Structure formats: structure tokens, C-alpha cells
Image (cartoon, helix red, strand yellow):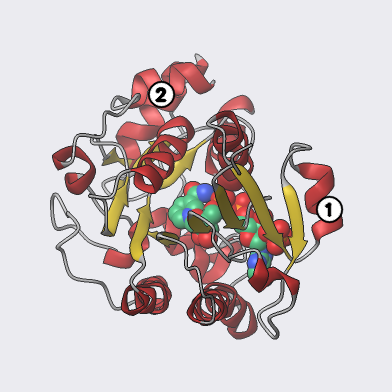
């Protein structure tokens, strides 16, 4: 019997990871989840996923899981909206991404049979808050906190190229999913009858349907032409005002009550900038290499999800 191709995933218990584990299982891969809490991961993930504990401080059993794997998908990171952005939470946001990627690449270096590909997280926040139209993968990085985190995160991942590993960094937009992440939070005010744009409303919102997020990762895993930064966004970014109008329409509720940026900042601190600023990002590389988006139109994506 031939051994199944193995894919090792960090952050597999998260929004993207859970769906990816299911998809890769269906494609015939053996999936290994590296989790801070493998017992919990075992409860969350499908039965056929192997769950191994990992920590960035030491390479125990988890490093052995990388030996001879086809690929590694690195999605671990503390949630951006997990707490108010105190200095210590900002350090958690940064370290949970940069130090885990560093530990992963160090472990990859010590493997005799190295995986062929490392697909690692990043975000459209790489480009910083921007009014520049149509940013593609060649655009320069920003200078705010999140851009700096994304740049440091990608820098660690790209170290694996020196090991002969193909590296892809996913500059992910807002992932739209029915049950988790940004969409249920954005939909709540509409359910309560007080939905509307987040002011100024002209800020860009680059989004991606969860099915395309999983589609892009699976494609990048299998297609050797995909390497370097990859914008993981639908080819139709829109302004916050347009997005909220579409959301209201999908829910059959009006988008009438604008949310003032100042109020958000008082409530959420610096994290409010995630909502009141944005960037118009296009998936130029994915389209050039022929990835076909299932959802390029926000109205269709929202109709499917709501
Ligand atoms: N969802 C989006 O809209 C979006 C947009 C842009 C970028 N991204 C990035 O894509 C990646 C995956 O996104 P997601 O939405 O699936 O994330 P998620 O649901 O928040 O899950 C991330 C996973 O990271 C691990 N994790 C959480 N806190 C951690 C910490 N302090 N240190 C180390 N690991 C920690 C957890 O796995 P264990 O508990 O099993 O260890 C968790 O399941 C993230 O890095 C995120 O920044 C997501």
C-alpha cells in the first residue's frame, strides 16, 4: 500500500484550518495538525486528522511530523480582535506569528527529507491602510503595526527558500464564512436593525469567500508555479459602504445607521483601524496563473453565506 501524501498544518483548529483539514482529507492527503492543545484539536478536527502538540520553545515530537511531508501550511496566530490592543497584546499578535514561523523554519532546516512547499500566513494588512488603487503583489509594504507584523512574519517564512523549499505567503483579505470570523460580527447590527457602513465608508474592503480561501491554498499546495507572496482576495474589492449595502440587501435589512470611526476607536482602541481603514487588493498572481474564483462577486458570495 502506498503511503498517503502528508500535509502538516499549524493553526488547523481555526476558521480557515478546520475547513482546510476537511478539504485536504477529501483530496486524499494525510493531515497532521500541530496544535498548542492537541487534545482539544482532536475534539475539533475530523477523526482522520492526526493531532500533535507543539510549542515554539522546543522541538519535540512535532518536528518529526515534518520529515518527508509534502507540504506545511502555517496558519497559527493569536486573533487580531481577541483583546484590546495593549502593548502586551500587540506583542502576542506579533510573537504568535513571527516566533512560530521562526520555530517552524528552524525545524524544517534540521529535517533530512524536507517538505516541498511551505504555505504561510500573512494578510492584506501587509500593504498598510491605503487609498492607492489596485494593489497587487508587487506593491510595497506599509508602515503601521500590522504591516510591520506581516512583513516580519513573511520574512521568517521566506527563510525556508534557502532550504530549497517553495514558499508561498498568503496575503489574505477578510475571509467571509457563515459561522466564524468577520461576517457574523458584521451581520449582527443588521439583525438588530441598526446596520450600516463604518465611517468614512470610502475605505476599501478586500474580501474572499471561505471556499475560495480553501481553493487557493489547495491549489498553491499542488501547483509548483505558485511561489512568493499571493494575494488571497476576490478580484472585486469594494468600499466599506458598498459592502454594507450588499450585506443589508442579502439580509433583507436596510444599511442606514453609519458607525462613526471615533466611537469604534473608543470601544476597540487601535484595533478599530482594522475596520475604519483598508486597502484595495487584487489577486493578480492567482489570476495570471489561472486560478478560477468561485465567488468573484460579493452579492453572490453573501447570498450563498447568509
Ligand atoms: N480569517 C481572516 O479573515 C483572516 C484574514 C487575514 C489573515 N488571516 C490570517 O490567517 C491565519 C488563519 O486565520 P484564521 O481566521 O483561521 O485564524 P483563527 O481562527 O484565529 O485560528 C488561528 C489558530 O492559531 C492558533 N493560535 C491562536 N492563538 C495563538 C497564539 N497565541 N500562539 C500560537 N498559536 C495561536 C490556534 O490553533 P491551536 O490552538 O490549535 O494552536 C488557532 O486555531 C491567521 O494567522 C490570520 O491572521 C485571517
User: Is the distance from the Cβ of mark 2 to the nearest ligand 1 atom less than 8 Å?
Assistant: no
Image coords of residue 42 (percent x, y)? 81, 48
**Secondary structure under the numbered disc 1 in the rendered image:** helix
3 w.r.t. 190: above or below: below
- Left or right of residue 292, residue 118 in this image: right
User: Is the distance from the Cβ of mark 1 to the nearest ligand 1 atom less than 8 Å?
Assistant: yes
Q: Are marks 2 and 1 in contact (CB under 8 Å)?
A: no
Image coords of residue 202 (percent x, y)? 26, 46
Q: Residue at x 26, y 51 (%)?
A: 226
Of badges 2 and 1, the one in the foreground is 1
196 w.r.t. 252: above or below: below
Image coords of residue 188 (percent x, y)? 61, 34
Q: Residue at x 18, y 70 (%)?
A: 140
Is 202 or 167 nearer to us in this picture? Answer: 167
Kindly give the residue lying farthest to the top in the view shown: 252
Few, some or many residues within 10 Å of mark 2 (<14, 14–19, 20+): many
Is 2 or 244 nearer to us in this picture? Answer: 2
- Left or right of residue 60, residue 253 in this image: left
Image coords of residue 101 (percent x, y)? 51, 74
Q: Which residue is mark 2?
A: 301
**Secondary structure under the numbered disc 2 in the rendered image:** helix
Q: What count of labels does the image hold?
A: 2
- Left or right of residue 176, residue 201 in this image: left
State the quadrant of the C terminus: top right
Q: Quadrant of residue 205?
A: top left
Q: Quadrant of ligand 1?
A: bottom right
Q: Which residue is mark 1?
A: 40
Q: Residue at x 59, y 47 (%)?
A: 17
Q: Residue at x 57, y 40 (%)?
A: 29
Q: Is residue 253 visible?
A: no
Amino acid at each position: 500500500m502506498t503511503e498517503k501524501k502528508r500535509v502538516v498544518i499549524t493553526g488547523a483548529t481555526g476558521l480557515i484550518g478546520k475547513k482546510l483539514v476537511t478539504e485536504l482529507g477529501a483530496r486524499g492527503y494525510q493531515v497532521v495538525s500541530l496544535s498548542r492543545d492537541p487534545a482539544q484539536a482532536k475534539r475539533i478536527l475530523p477523526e482522520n486528522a492526526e493531532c500533535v502538540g507543539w510549542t515554539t520553545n522546543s522541538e519535540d515530537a512535532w518536528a518529526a511530523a515534518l520529515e518527508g511531508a509534502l507540504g506545511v501550511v502555517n496558519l497559527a496566530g493569536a486573533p487580531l480582535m481577541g483583546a484590546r490592543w495593549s502593548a502586551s497584546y500587540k506583542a502576542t499578535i506579533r510573537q504568535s506569528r513571527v516566533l512560530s514561523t521562526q520555530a517552524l523554519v528552524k525545524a524544517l532546516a534540521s529535517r533530512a527529507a524536507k517538505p516541498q512547499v511551505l504555505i504561510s500566513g500573512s494578510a492584506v494588512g501587509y500593504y498598510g491602510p491605503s487609498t492607492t488603487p489596485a494593489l497587487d503583489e508587487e506593491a510595497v509594504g506599509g508602515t503601521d503595526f500590522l504591516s510591520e507584523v506581516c512583513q516580519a512574519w513573511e520574512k521568517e517564512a521566506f527563510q525556508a527558500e534557502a532550504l530549497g523549499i517553495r514558499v508561498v505567503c498568503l496575503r489574505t483579505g477578510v475571509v467571509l464564512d457563515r459561522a466564524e470570523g468577520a461576517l457574523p460580527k458584521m451581520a449582527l447590527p443588521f439583525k438588530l436593525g441598526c446596520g450600516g457602513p463604518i465611517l468614512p465608508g470610502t475605505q476599501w474592503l478586500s474580501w474572499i469567500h471561505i471556499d475560495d480561501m480553501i481553493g487557493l491554498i489547495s491549489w498553491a499546495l499542488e501547483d509548483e508555479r505558485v511561489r512568493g507572496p499571493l494575494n488571497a482576495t476576490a478580484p472585486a474589492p469594494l468600499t466599506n459602504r458598498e459592502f454594507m449595502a450588499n450585506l443589508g440587501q442579502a439580509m433583507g435589512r436596510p444599511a442606514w445607521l453609519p458607525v462613526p470611526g471615533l466611537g469604534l476607536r473608543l470601544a476597540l482602541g487601535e484595533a478599530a483601524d482594522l475596520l475604519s481603514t483598508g486597502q484595495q487588493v487584487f489577486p493578480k498572481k492567482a489570476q495570471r496563473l489561472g486560478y478560477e474564483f468561485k465567488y468573484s462577486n460579493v452579492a453572490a458570495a453573501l447570498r450563498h453565506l447568509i
